């Protein structure tokens, strides 16, 4: 397990280091134009990285199993924060959605905290229900209720993309814990009408889906981001235009240093650079699954699996959006995009994975 821990730490550090370079490359001209300081976003990104490392090392200092004693109040606090972000004067509204608090000039997105704590909560809940996991009302329903309430609060913001991500991670954890396949299929079947209403009965979401299907139908409107991302992808070729040489970041591609940083990577470093990033995330996923497979403790097994899926699914969605394989969704690329609460809690998730692997090593040593 020590080798797996070391490899996971190295993979994460490589992604963080690469992200540091690409954030500056993608944001320097935009930052200079808007703030007069080309390193504006880089400096803030370094602050987020420092906070992330502090939290990462913090979660590595104690036995992760002690989290089970505090997970219920943590879940309650995170849900209260997710509720308060909708209160005018407390939550900050950007682009028609209330998803952020502003603390000393630093944005904090409570949904990121909820995702982190929700995985811990579900891991504890499912570990306790192992003997009765086949029973829906007696075992599964209470956990699904917490997941459903979290999703409902996200939909109020509104944030359908994050809500779907939480549902997928949660249901995968239920399935891994022993939920019957027919129960899982029934939940998916029941959710289809609600998903249809949330997407096709809400004007801006319907436009986003139509833009995904045919971005050239509205090239200056809803299809603009997708088209500009595809231009960036196509311009890079095999080896790219060179680090710092992107043209799309020159006020063509919105959110170049956040949601669409993968497109800038493809443009500057080509297919080779983009493939390298995908390989690193594939290795991250594989090492996270290896930790989950090796851990004997049910809570640790489910927790490591859930954290791995939470980060990996975000990476899949972000890359899928950049490649034009999924509808546009405002979601950063883990470890690589310009920082914020997402970067901090992604790093904390890695710290928790390393914590789980470390204590499994110690347990094995004691047994031997």
Image (cartoon, rainbow, N blue to C red):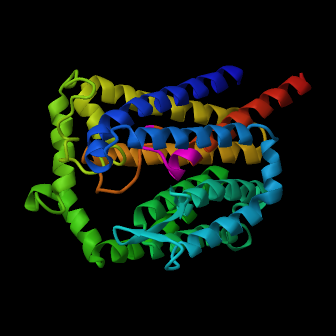
Nearer to me, 54 or 280? 54
At 76% across and 65% down in the image, what residue appears?
Answer: 73
Q: Position of residue 28 (x, y in %)?
A: 31, 38
Q: Position of residue 277 (x, y in %)?
A: 39, 30
Q: Is residue 258 above or below residue 98?
A: above
Q: Position of residue 158 (x, y in %)?
A: 42, 72
Nearer to me, 32 or 254? 32
At 29% across and 56% down in the image, what residue appears?
Answer: 328
Residue 49 falls in image quadrant: top right
Q: Is residue 333 visible?
A: yes
Nearer to me, 303 or 265? 265
Residue 244 falls in image quadrant: top left
Q: Is residue 189 visible?
A: no
In this view, which residue lies farthest toward the front? 36
Q: Which residues are magenta?
A: 336-344
Left or right of 157: which side holds 90? right
Q: Is 10 colored magenta in this rendering? A: no
Left or right of 364: which side holds 262? left
Q: How many marks?
A: 0
Q: Is residue 14 above or below residue 108?
A: above
Picture quarter with the N terminus? top right
Residue 191 falls in image quadrant: bottom left
Q: Position of residue 171 (x, y in %)?
A: 56, 58
At 76% across and 55% down in the image, what residue appears?
Answer: 130
At 52% across and 45% down in the image, what residue appears?
Answer: 343
Left or right of 240: which side holds 218? left
Picture quarter with the C terminus? top right
């Amino acid at each position: 397990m020590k080798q797996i821990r070391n490899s996971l730490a190295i993979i994460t550090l490589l992604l963080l280091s690469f992200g540091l370079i690409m954030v500056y490359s993608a944001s320097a001209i935009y930052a200079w134009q808007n703030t007069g300081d080309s390193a504006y976003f880089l400096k803030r990104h370094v602050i987020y990285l420092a906070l992330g490392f502090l939290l990462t090392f913090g979660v590595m200092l104690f036995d992760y199993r002690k989290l089970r004693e505090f997970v219920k109040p943590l879940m309650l606090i995170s849900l209260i924060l997710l509720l308060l972000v909708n209160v005018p004067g407390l939550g900050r509204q950007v682009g028609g959605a209330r998803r952020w608090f502003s603390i000393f000039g630093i944005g904090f997105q409570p949904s990121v905290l909820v995702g982190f704590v929700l995985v811990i909560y579900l891991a504890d809940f499912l570990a306790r229900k192992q003997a009765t996991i086949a029973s829906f009302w007696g075992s599964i329903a209470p956990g699904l209720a917490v997941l459903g309430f979290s999703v409902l609060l996200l939909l109020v913001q509104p944030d359908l993309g994050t809500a779907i991500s939480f549902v997928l991670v949660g249901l995968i954890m239920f399935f891994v814990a022993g939920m019957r396949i027919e129960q899982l299929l029934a939940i998916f079947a029941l959710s289809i009408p609600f998903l249809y209403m949330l997407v096709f009965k809400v004007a801006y979401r319907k436009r986003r889906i139509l833009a995904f299907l045919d971005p050239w139908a509205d090239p200056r409107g809803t299809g603009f981001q997708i088209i500009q991302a595809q231009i960036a992808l196509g311009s890079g070729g095999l080896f790219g235009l060179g680090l710092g040489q992107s043209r799309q970041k020159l006020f063509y591609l919105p959110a170049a240093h956040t949601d669409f940083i993968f497109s800038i990577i493809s443009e500057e470093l080509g297919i080779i650079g983009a493939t390298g990033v995908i390989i690193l995330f594939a290795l991250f996923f594989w090492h996270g699954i290896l930790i989950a497979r090796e851990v004997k403790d049910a809570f640790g097994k489910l927790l490591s699996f859930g954290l791995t899926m939470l980060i990996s699914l975000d990476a899949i969605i972000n890359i899928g959006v950049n490649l034009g394989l999924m509808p546009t969704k405002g979601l950063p690329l883990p470890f690589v995009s310009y920082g914020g609460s997402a970067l901090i809690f992604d790093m904390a998730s890695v710290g928790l994975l390393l914590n789980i692997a470390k204590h499994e090593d110690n347990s094995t040593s004691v047994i031997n």
